[in-house]
């Protein structure tokens, strides 16, 4: 907010009076303040904030920089790099990927050629770096740091006016790409104290405008956030189920288990009653729903049963980890379910037996034909190691708004391989400081069977199942709308691209499972497999065998072209 105001004052100072008379400080004083702040504030903080700082910077258009032909690199380049084409491709509304890729990945950048390109056209090279950084943020986050470093060095060494107002309009490009660079905002439904497991002497909050973004440490002194209050009520109402297992020392160990999901929006809210009914049909009454808008809350509270299972919140992908973390601090195990799943059998006995037999603290679903994890189904055991690990993961994601939740989840498990050594961790940062400081003790963990018990729909060339359909416990649709930032490029990708996993353009797989006329599907445990359309949709994901050699985890071509598979 301060930077936004300073930029506004500076524009008035150097470009003449505005309609409102504003006292103008010395230009050099404002300039020094802005330079210092741009040195200090990470670029992705500028992109991630709700303050329109990036737009204000692009709006400045400061002379002589904005019209400087040297900074524009208008002269022909001996290496054959057509800088003008790249500059044109990065203007708002252009096909920046199609028109810019040939220049951004020009052969002259190979080897040590990049140093000549840097000397020849500094801001063209910076623009190419920002272009590639944007690609990385949407695909493989590990290379973001590599290309971001060009901006960091440039803003340190050059006058800020030259960096932000040269003819390349880099901040205009960032503004245009904001929706693809920002997977979440800088706000959470819980305070820092609550996420650290610090329960103050507090009273429950009264009803208020709870669907506004919640900010600040509401746990201080006398109050907790409404989301934390609701989580406490869930536990106090006895929604989690008690179970008994054997500890590492052989003594009885009492635990509590809660199934948790989150939901919001007109695409999913209508299916809350059937999601809950289906869970109850197989014996899962210990279910809590994180209701991220008012319609979801109303639908949840309208159902028969305790209102305490309905937890208030606001839309954010961060909630996939914040609510489980709160419950872990309250001594409750959490089985996280993405909402785009269908429960065919109660997995409780299976997962509790697995946790005890394998002495693990975390179970996560996997992939059929590659060595990736899938964070759509995760069992978190309420241990100190799991809670501290998840808090560190959550903190990193909060600070890095471009980070994909599943990539981050996988990367933070890298310090301890799964018990079967069946997965390859993803990499989300090439920064040496990440490798040095982001090393929390990882929990002992294993995979939930992705072959038949916990499979994903065949919407990618690496998903599906083999075996008997009767052995499936939970079927994950991979519906493609896990991006709760609806403006993000990944939102609705599968359906929009024709990867329907047994559905069709006219009838998505989500609707096949949750929009059946036969209510028995949602009230009787075995009824779904008796329905022709549901069974057909399941079998559309069946494969005759699982490949013996897994693809490496990472971006893969999204077409079914694995030889013989």
Image (cartoon, rainbow, N blue to C red):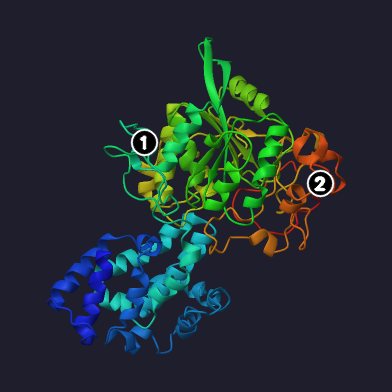
Q: Is residue 330 left or right of residue 201?
A: right
Query: Residue reaching furthest top?
Result: 251
> Is residue 247 among what the camera can see?
no
Considering only vertical position in the picture, is 168 above or below 151?
A: below
Q: Residue at x 44, y 51 (%)?
A: 429
Comparing 533 with 297, the one in front is 297
Task: Please tell me in which quadrant of the rendered image residue 68 appears.
Answer: bottom left
Residue 498 found in image quarter? bottom right
Residue at 46% x, 85% y: name it.
84
Q: Secondary structure at mark 2?
A: helix
- The residue closer to the viewer here, 342 or 64, is 342
Secondary structure state at the residue bearing disc 1: loop
| Residue 33 seen in the current view | yes
Neighbourhood count class around disc 2 (C-alpha, 10 Å): few under 14, some 14–19, many 20 upward: many
Q: Is label 1 in contact with label 2 (beta carbons under 8 Å)? A: no
- From the image, tell me which residue sits under label 1: 196
Q: Is residue 280 above or below residue 354?
A: below
* Residue that numbered label 2 is attached to: 534
Placement of 37 over or under 161, stated as above or below: above
For the residues labelled 1 and 2, the Cα–Cα distance comes to 43 Å
Q: Residue furthest left?
A: 26
> Closer to the camera, 21 or 376?
21
Residue 51 lies left or right of residue 35; in this view the side is right
N-terminal-most mark, 1 or 2: 1
Q: Position of residue 373 (x, y in %)?
A: 60, 42
**Position of 196 relative to 158 (above/below):** above
- Total marks shown come to 2
Percent coordinates x, y for residue 366 in the rendering:
64, 41
Q: Position of residue 272 (x, y in %)?
A: 64, 46
Image quadrant where one finds the N terminus? bottom left
Q: Residue 403, image x and y in percent?
A: 47, 53
Is residue 119 toward the left or the right of residue 256 in the image? left
């Amino acid at each position: 907010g301060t930077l936004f105001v300073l930029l506004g004052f500076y524009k008035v100072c150097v470009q003449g009076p505005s309609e409102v008379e504003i006292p103008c400080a010395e230009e050099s004083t404002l300039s020094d303040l802005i330079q210092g702040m741009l040195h200090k504030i990470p670029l992705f903080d500028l992109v991630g904030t709700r303050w329109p700082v990036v737009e204000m910077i692009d709006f400045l258009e400061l002379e002589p920089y904005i019209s400087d032909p040297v900074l524009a690199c208008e002269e022909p380049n001996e290496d054959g790099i057509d800088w003008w084409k790249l500059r044109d491709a990065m203007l708002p509304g252009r096909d920046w990927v199609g028109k810019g890729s040939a220049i951004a990945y020009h052969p002259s950048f190979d080897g040590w050629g990049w140093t000549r390109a840097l000397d020849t056209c500094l801001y063209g090279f910076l623009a190419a770096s920002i272009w590639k950084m944007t690609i990385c943020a949407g695909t493989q986050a590990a290379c973001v740091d590599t290309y971001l470093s060009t901006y960091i060095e440039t803003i340190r060494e050059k006058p800020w006016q030259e960096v932000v107002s040269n003819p390349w309009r880099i901040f205009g490009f960032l503004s245009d790409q904001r929706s693809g660079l920002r997977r979440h905002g800088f706000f959470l439904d819980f305070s820092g104290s609550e996420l650290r497991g610090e329960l103050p002497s507090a009273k429950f909050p009264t009803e208020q405008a709870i669907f506004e973004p919640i900010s600040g440490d509401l746990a201080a002194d006398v109050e907790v956030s409404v989301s934390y209050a609701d989580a406490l009520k869930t536990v106090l109402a006895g929604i989690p189920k008690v179970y008994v297992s054997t500890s590492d020392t052989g003594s009885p160990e009492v635990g509590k288990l809660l199934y948790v999901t989150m939901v919001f929006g007109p695409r999913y809210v209508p299916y809350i009653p059937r999601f809950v009914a289906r869970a109850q049909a197989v014996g899962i009454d210990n279910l809590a729903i994180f209701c991220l808008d008012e319609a979801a809350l109303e639908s949840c509270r309208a159902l028969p049963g305790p209102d305490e299972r309905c937890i208030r919140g606001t839309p954010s992908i961060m909630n996939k980890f914040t609510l489980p973390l709160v419950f872990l601090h309250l001594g409750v195990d959490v089985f996280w379910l993405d909402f785009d799943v269908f429960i065919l059998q109660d997995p409780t006995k299976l997962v509790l037996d697995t946790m005890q037999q394998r002495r693990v603290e975390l179970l996560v679903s996997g992939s059929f034909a590659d060595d990736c994890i899938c964070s759509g189904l995760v069992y978190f055991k309420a241990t100190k190691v799991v809670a501290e690990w998840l808090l560190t993961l959550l903190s990193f994601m909060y600070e890095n708004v471009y980070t994909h939740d599943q990539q981050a989840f996988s990367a933070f498990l890298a310090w301890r391989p799964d018990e079967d050594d069946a997965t390859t961790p993803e990499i989300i940062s090439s920064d040496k400081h990440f490798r040095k400081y982001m090393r929390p003790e990882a929990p002992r963990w294993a995979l939930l069977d992705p072959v038949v018990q916990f499979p994903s729909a065949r919407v990618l060339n690496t998903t599906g199942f083999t075996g008997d359909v009767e052995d499936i416990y939970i079927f994950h649709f991979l519906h493609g709308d896990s991006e709760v930032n609806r403006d993000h490029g990944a939102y609705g990708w599968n359906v929009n691209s024709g990867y329907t996993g047994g559905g069709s353009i006219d009838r998505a797989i989500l609707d096949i499972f949750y929009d059946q006329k036969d209510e028995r599907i949602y009230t009787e445990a075995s009824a779904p497999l008796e329905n022709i359309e549901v069974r057909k949709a399941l079998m559309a994901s069946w494969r005759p065998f699982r490949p013996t050699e897994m693809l490496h985890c990472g971006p893969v071509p999204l077409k079914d072209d694995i030889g013989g598979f």
